[in-house]
Amino acid sequence: MMLFTTNWLATFFSEFRGKVTDSIHIKSVVTDSRKPGRQSLFVPLAGENFDGHDYLEQAVHNGAVAALWEKKKPLPAFLPTDFPVFFVSDTLTSLQQLAAAYRRRVNPLVIGITGSNGKTTTKDLVSAVVGKKYRTHFTKGNFNNHIGLPLTILSMPDHTEALVLEMGMNHFGEIDVLTKIAAPDFAIITNIGEAHIEFLGSRAGIAKAKLEIIHGLKKQGVFIYDGDEPLLQLKNYVHRTITCGFNTENDMVIRNTSIHEQQTTFQLSDENSYRIPLLGRHHAQNATYAITIGLELGIRPADIQDAFDKLHLTGMRFEMLPGKNGATIVNDAYNASPSAMRASIEVVKQLENYDEKVLVLGDMFELGDAAEKWHRQVAESIQAPITAVFTFGKDAQYISSEVKKRTPEIINMHFETKEALTEKLSEVLRPNMIVLFKASRGMHFESIVKELLDAT
Ligand code: ATP
Ligand code: MG
């Protein structure tokens, strides 16, 4: 596969040196010089601790056949004079411009997805559905920021027909940049939660930042969003909107959600029923975004269902795994925010077949001054049939102390060390028990999960 030639690069990076021809084929774009990239274009980025410009030699060793280069910086002496180098004022901006230009050239149908929770899951669902009809390229893992999104675009084969992009952010202005690179035909906001409230001030601030996604929406594009969220009402600003949610005023109304051991089933306003291999009402909503796009693109409900049946999901999101002593471990340790934590707790409450339901909860990051309040609020979701709550972390202790007040009948323990928590859990695990692990990524709860999995 070839992305483009150095000649094509020269059409918009006008300052260059070295040999620029149609015979130099670029097959990949890399920013990490350590990564093997046969016939790659190396884009050195300056980070806080390292500057990619210092690693050109390594990049060339690993397969780079051309590079972007910040004008002000001297070129290293080892470089042969015919090696193509394109001089730019800022390599990051140029990477983003290059991604936009390549996206225009390939011209796929673009679906952009943002929201506080459920972006990656929705991306997986949408990609599966759209993949039924189109050659589809999508964000791998969580490559959703100002570097990951351009690199995702620049790894798409040139025959790509549909491109599904996750867009993440921490601050105002970030989605604006991403959506302008992507120019989506469909823009989705999955929901508004509390993640990154530290930087955005309030839930209204979060909504405003996510709504930047419509800045890049194509003129005839469709904006699809959580219609149950009052902060997302802006029908007049875009060509077409489709709202999805549980309230009956939505365009796509989700009804009769039912959660089972391996799947969630629900019905939509078009009278079709769907089942997804994901647990929870919130995932029925994520799937509804994918169904909406599928139907818009003329994909039949039976094919949409088939896509869901064969779903490949990105890991550590509500993975139900066999634990020691016959217990069931739910590894949901990928990340957490208050709404995501509460959504997962609701799923655990609704699952049948368990006599004991244990929550292992840790700190949720980036909640700013209101962190205590948000942690305490989680306790509102904790009552029977939850039987025990174990917490670890400086803010998670507020969950514990609030549970003590509200529902003293629930077993409730706070731990000072992960080791103590792991030891206690190994003692209590037994059959017919389900144990949910949920915390922010940085709490690394997966290390506890690892200790408690059935080794046989
Ligand atoms: P990140 O910001 O880390 O990229 P994300 O938005 O991609 O997260 P996912 O990785 O899909 O989100 O899901 C993270 C967690 O959010 C899930 O484990 C689940 O608990 C929760 N979640 C997913 N969808 C929703 C939703 N619609 N409402 C509330 N919580 C949700
Ligand atoms: Mg994600």
Image: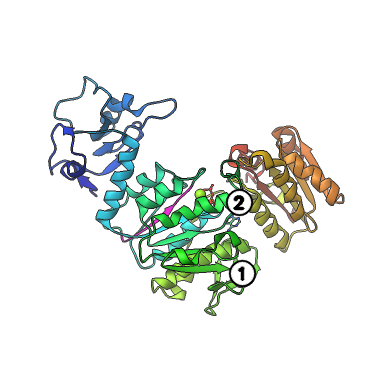
Number of residues whose C-alpha sits closer than 10 Å to that of mark 1, classed few (under 14), some (14–19) or many (20 or more): some
- Span of residues in magenta: 161-168
Does residue 215 appear left or right of residue 431 in this picture?
left
Q: For the point 48% across and 48% down, which residue is it?
A: 168
- Say what secondary structure mark 1 lies in: loop
Residue 374 visible within the image: yes
Q: Position of residue 138 (x, y in %)?
A: 39, 54
Give above or below for 158 relative to 254. Answer: above
Give the residue at mark 1: 246
Q: Residue furthest front?
A: 236
Give the residue at mark 2: 203
| Camera-side residue of 172 and 269 | 172
Q: Position of residue 131 (x, y in %)?
A: 39, 63
Q: For the point 24% across and 48% down, which residue is it?
A: 3
Q: Position of residue 306 (x, y in %)?
A: 46, 69
Mark 2–mark 1 Cα distance, whole angstroms, equals 20 Å
| Camera-side residue of 371 and 341 | 371
- Say what secondary structure mark 2 lies in: helix
| Camera-side residue of 96 and 449 | 96
Does residue 295 appear left or right of residue 15 in this picture?
right
Does residue 8 appear left or right of residue 350 in this picture?
left
Q: Position of residue 173 (x, y in %)?
A: 45, 45
Q: Residue furthest right?
A: 409
Give above or below for 399 relative to 416. Answer: below
The amino acid pointed to by label 1 is Phe
* Residue 280 figure quarter: bottom right
Does residue 425 appear left or right of residue 13 in this picture?
right
Q: Is residue 295 magenta?
A: no
